[in-house]
Amino acid sequence: MSAVLYFVFCGLIGYWASCRGRSAILWAILAFFISPLLSGIVLAIMKDQSMQASISDLQMGQQQLHDRIATNEKMTEQHFQQLHQQIAQQGQEQGKLPPAAQAAQPALPAGSSQPRFCANCGTPLAPGERFCPKCGTKAEG
Ligand SMILES: [Zn+2]
């Protein structure tokens, strides 16, 4: 085997090593000192680090994505909490003022309809009363 060919093999081993995610210089030197064939076999047996690196990159990317989603969830949650607080504050501020909606709603007892009047004589009818107390006309509804 000529010296030139030997160097070419060492270079090839170095190049191959770099393709597999390993140090090209280290493996070229290793091939030079041991033997290109032996180091080539060792390199072939050893796990492809470039593949592992890409897998770990993927896993890292996934982790980052998870973190980002978690952060987004937290931010959304905080946003909602802030919204809730704002709504609560607005409600309190509205509670200090006498709002028409709040004043009107408690005036009507729950479940009761609007005040009714007799269709015939116009007498106000008590809730639940089915006949007019004045003229005896049957109440609507
Ligand atoms: Zn009546």
Image (spheres, rainbow, N blue to C red):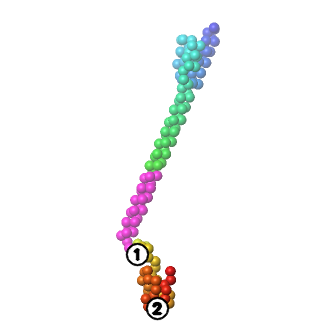
Total numbered labels: 2
> Could you tell me residue 35's position as x and y percent?
57, 12
Q: Quadrant of residue 79?
A: bottom left
| Secondary structure predominantly adopted by residues drawn in magenta | helix
Q: Earlier in the sequence, mark 1 or mark 2?
A: 1
Instruction: Residue at 58%, 16% (x, y): give it.
Output: 40
Q: Is mark 2 within 8 Å of ligand 1?
A: yes
Neighbor class of circle 2 (other Cα within 10 Å; few <14, some 14-19, many 20+) is few
Q: Secondary structure at mark 2?
A: loop
Reply above or below: 54 against 102.
Answer: above
Q: Is residue 81 magenta?
A: yes
Q: Which mark is residue 109?
A: 1
Q: Is residue 122 visible?
A: no
> Could you tell me residue 124's position as x and y percent?
44, 86
Q: Which amino acid is tagged 2?
A: Cys
What whole-number distance in Å separates the C-alpha atoms at marks 1 and 2?
27 Å
Neighbor class of circle 1 (other Cα within 10 Å; few <14, some 14-19, many 20+) is few
> Could you tell me residue 138's position as x and y percent?
49, 86
Q: Is residue 96 visible?
A: yes
**Camera-side residue of 23 and 117:** 117
Instruction: Residue at 44%, 74% (x, y): give it.
Output: 111
**Camera-side residue of 108 and 11:** 108
Q: Which residue is mark 2?
A: 135
Q: Is mark 1 within 8 Å of ligand 1?
A: no
Q: Quadrant of the N terminus?
A: top right
Q: Hey, which residue is sitting farthest top in the picture?
A: 1
Reply above or below: 92 against 106.
Answer: above
Q: Is residue 102 magenta?
A: no
**Looking at the image, is mark 1 or mark 2 nearer the viewer?**
2
Q: Which amino acid is tagged 1?
A: Pro
Q: Which residues are magenta?
A: 76-99
